Image: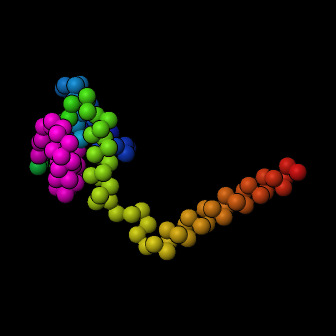
Amino acid sequence: MNLPSFDFTNWREHPSDNRYTVFFFKTEQESNYFKKLLEEHNVWYEFNFDKSEPNYNYYFAVNKVNEKQVITYNHLAVGEYRKPFLQVPVLRYVLIISMFAILVLAVISYYKSHS
């Protein structure tokens, strides 16, 4: 599948049949979890494994009628195995507190400059 170089989503319109959306995954774990969610919710899909593709090997074609529902399942599958952006909890809280402090300072300076 020919993919754009900069995109945050892991789904595209089917290249030859616009009635379907294709979801693709890098790992077998994500793929199996997504498959489990589809089967639990009785969503019809077609599965393909492509060993020759360097980045994405697991493909699911889903009817566009279910697209909105399946995108939710896709987010759950990807999020289940995603590592946090900042893996050290202390750094996460320092970043949040710093951003909040900068925001408060910006609001205070705005009101001081306009009073």
Question: How was the colour assigned to the protein in this rendering?
Answer: rainbow
Judge from the rendering whether residue 36 lies leftward or rightward of residue 13; answer left or right: left
Would you say residue 26 sits in the magenta stretch? yes
- Residue drawn at (11%, 42%) of the image: 48
**x 17%, y 39%: residue:** 42
In the rendered image, is residue 95 in sight?
Answer: yes
Residue 64 against residue 31 in the figure, above or below: above
From which residue to which does the magenta span run? 24-50
Dividing the picture into quadrants, the one containing residue 19 is top left
Identify whether 71 is placed above or below 27: above
Q: Position of residue 91 (x, y in %)?
A: 50, 72
Residue under the point 23% across and 25% down: 18
Residue 31 appears in view: no
Q: How many marks?
A: 0
User: At which x and y percent is residue 49?
Assistant: 11, 46
Q: Residue at x 85, y 49 (%)?
A: 114
Q: Position of residue 4 (x, y in %)?
A: 33, 39
